[in-house]
Amino acid sequence: MTRILARSRWLVPPLLVLALAAAGCGSSSSKKSSNTSSGGGKTTTTAKEAALAAATLNGSGSTFQQPFNEAAIAEFVKGQPNVTINYGGGGSGKGQTDLQGQLVDFAGSDGIPKPETLSAYKGGALLYFPTVAAPITVPYNLPDVAKLQLSADTIAKIFDRSVKKWDDAAIKADNPSAKLPSTDIVVVHRSDASGTTGNFTKYLTAAAPTEWKLGADKTVPWPSDTQAAAGNPGVASAVKSTPGAIGYVDYSDAKAAGLQFASVKNAAGSYIVPSLDSASAALAGVTVAPDLSYNPLNAPGAKAYPITSPTWVLVYKTQTDQAKGTALKAFLKFLLGGGQDLAAGVDFAKLPDSIKTPAVAQLDQIVVP
């Protein structure tokens, strides 16, 4: 069930709230989870902890991390039948805004809040927990072009509309052997405040500083002749249905939609296909800050996919409800423990120990009454 949910979500509205409780996990889900193991046929992902008190946790935010969240929630509540966890998308900006107003218990975000916004969080100090990582793909709709290579400068020119035709000289320079049509390029971007947009534009700022002029944030001033769509699933759907389109979509949703995507030139000068292996290569050797922020974008590794996005779960350091706080801490512990075994099944790269170990240690900082 969890893989089907993650694979089909691009077909439904991204603001749909998924409420996953034990009653919602049927026999097919149980059968799927019983086969999840790290070796020897023994299940390793079920939350095997003491039974928690009844609690309902609500979260919202990143659609980038949503497929992983759905899979992890479904598995966690099987071992904790008294806990219900709801997660709705809406984009990283919505998650942060909802957490500021204490409308949710946790937020999914592909970037950490800016320092100037921290005073808006009514619940006090925040903790950032990295969970998984994955490529941001650059999907395109050219059925007759099976392989496409793009450098950062060319991507920047396409998305700021300096390049408007698929047979433009800049694209030809990246693809000297390809037969490129004279089709108009249709740029599709996120309509919501998006961590995926934030990381995509941060990459362009770092890798194409001369060509990229639209800035880096959850929203940027896109040219008027571009198209907007809500959530990663919305962009995936728009690219799939629009001849000549190009966009930026998380790896899980791009695969779920059956999109073809470009290889992207990395900092070492190699064109790299987005994959879990190339995302893991980008994570290797990153510097993790004391607040557990880190940046794998434009990583220097020879095999690193350059648009690899981190993602976090944001929570208040001081919890006010004992049952909720205990359940939230247990869920985070699961995301960083057995839940990591679910990552590859929904097209995410698990965290290396260099990131996971300090995240697990940070669990002790959560104050539960």
Image: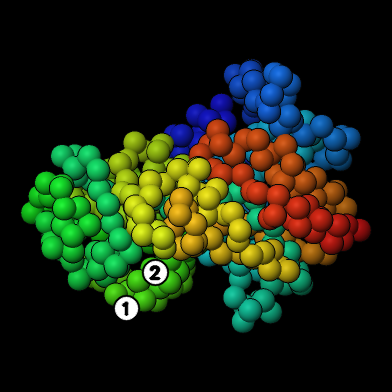
- Crowding around mark 2 (Cα neighbors within 10 Å: few <14, some 14 to 19, many 20+) is many
**Picture coordinates of residue 355 (x, y %)?**
68, 55
Q: Residue at x 61, y 71 (%)?
A: 113
CA separation, marks 1 and 2? Answer: 9 Å
**Picture coordinates of residue 74 (x, y %)?**
65, 34
Q: Residue at x 59, y 39 (%)?
A: 343
Is 21 left, or right, of 170 in this rendering?
Answer: right
Is 366 left, or right, of 212 in this rendering?
Answer: right
Q: Amino acid at mark 2?
A: Ala
Q: Which residue is mark 1?
A: 210
**Picture coordinates of residue 72 (x, y %)?**
65, 38
Q: Which residue is mark 2?
A: 207
Task: Check the image and report above or below for 345 versus 132.
Answer: above
Q: Quadrant of residue 230?
A: bottom left
Looking at this view, name the residue that lies furthest to the bottom: 116
Label 2 SS: helix
Q: Amino acid at mark 1?
A: Thr
Residue 183 visible in the shown view: yes
**Picture coordinates of residue 352 (x, y %)?**
65, 49
Task: Check the image and report above or below for 100 versus 357.
Answer: below
Q: Quadrant of residue 260?
A: top left
Is 101 left, or right, of 334 in this rendering?
Answer: left
- Name the foreground residue: 6 vs 139: 139
